[in-house]
Amino acid sequence: MSLSGATIDVINPKTGRLIGAVAAAQAADIDRAVEAARTAFRGWRRTPPAQRANILWRIADLIEKHGEELATLEALDVGMPIDLARELTAPRCADTFRYYAGWCSKLEGATTQTSLMDVHAYTLREPYGVCEQIVPGNAPVKMASWKLAPCLATGNV
């Protein structure tokens, strides 16, 4: 719910019928969300890679468990045929989270050779922090997974 209580109607584009309402975010709502993400980042960035991977696997399991619900919501929200939503939503989203779970423990820094004998050069991979995600409306659940999974896998929020 937005701080103002304002909402936006969600209309099924196939039928023109109202299927629900979502919060109409204002600047204050965005500020509140960013602050909550900053707070979460302090702990998440220190979460060991193996633990992050386990969490992403758990998210994939939950996506599969609720696959029919997600497909139904996706179909209603964008006017997609339910069979296509079943094919594109849960299985592909779960696969995306599992793919990035595998990267959690594979992203490392590197030591590189330089042309100077007394110079040591290395890279250190560190999370950036809060990441904004813009999710298109034509397949929002699937596209959100494409953005959220790599963000979380690398220690960002």
Image (cartoon, rainbow, N blue to C red):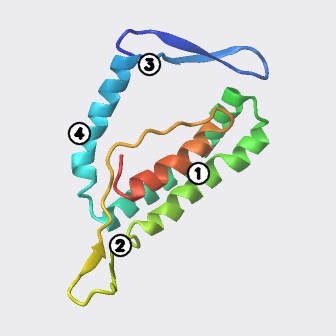
**Which numbered disc flags the more N-terminal residue, 1 or 2?**
1
Label 4 to label 1: alpha-carbon separation:
26 Å
Residues 108 and 110: in front is 110
Q: Residues within 10 Å of mark 1 (few under 14, many from 20)?
A: many
Residues 117 and 19: in front is 117
Q: Position of residue 61 (x, y in %)?
A: 50, 55
**Which numbered disc flags the more N-terminal residue, 4 or 1?**
4
- Secondary element type, mark 1: helix
The residue type indicated by label 4 comes to Thr
Q: Which label number is shown at residue 39?
A: 4
- Left or right of 71? Residue 154 is left
Number of the front mark, 2 or 4: 2
Label 3 to label 1: alpha-carbon separation:
26 Å
Instruction: Please give the count of numbered marks on the rendered protein.
Output: 4
The residue type indicated by label 1 comes to Cys
| Residue position marked by numbered label 2 in the rendering | 108
| Residue position marked by numbered label 1 in the rendering | 93
Q: Residues within 10 Å of mark 2 (few under 14, many from 20)?
A: few
- Above or below residue 26? Residue 112 is below
Do the CB atoms of the residues marked 2 and 3 lie less than 8 Å apart?
Answer: no
- Left or right of 128? Residue 21 is right
Q: Residue furthest bottom?
A: 117
Query: Which residue is rendered at x = 56% and y = 57% of the image?
Result: 96
Q: Position of residue 145 (x, y in %)?
A: 54, 48
Q: Position of residue 60 (x, y in %)?
A: 51, 54
The residue type indicated by label 2 comes to Glu
| Residue position marked by numbered label 3 in the rendering | 25
**Which numbered disc flags the more N-terminal residue, 3 or 1?**
3
Label 1 to label 2: alpha-carbon separation:
25 Å
The residue type indicated by label 3 comes to Ala
Do the CB atoms of the residues marked 2 and 4 lie less than 8 Å apart?
Answer: no
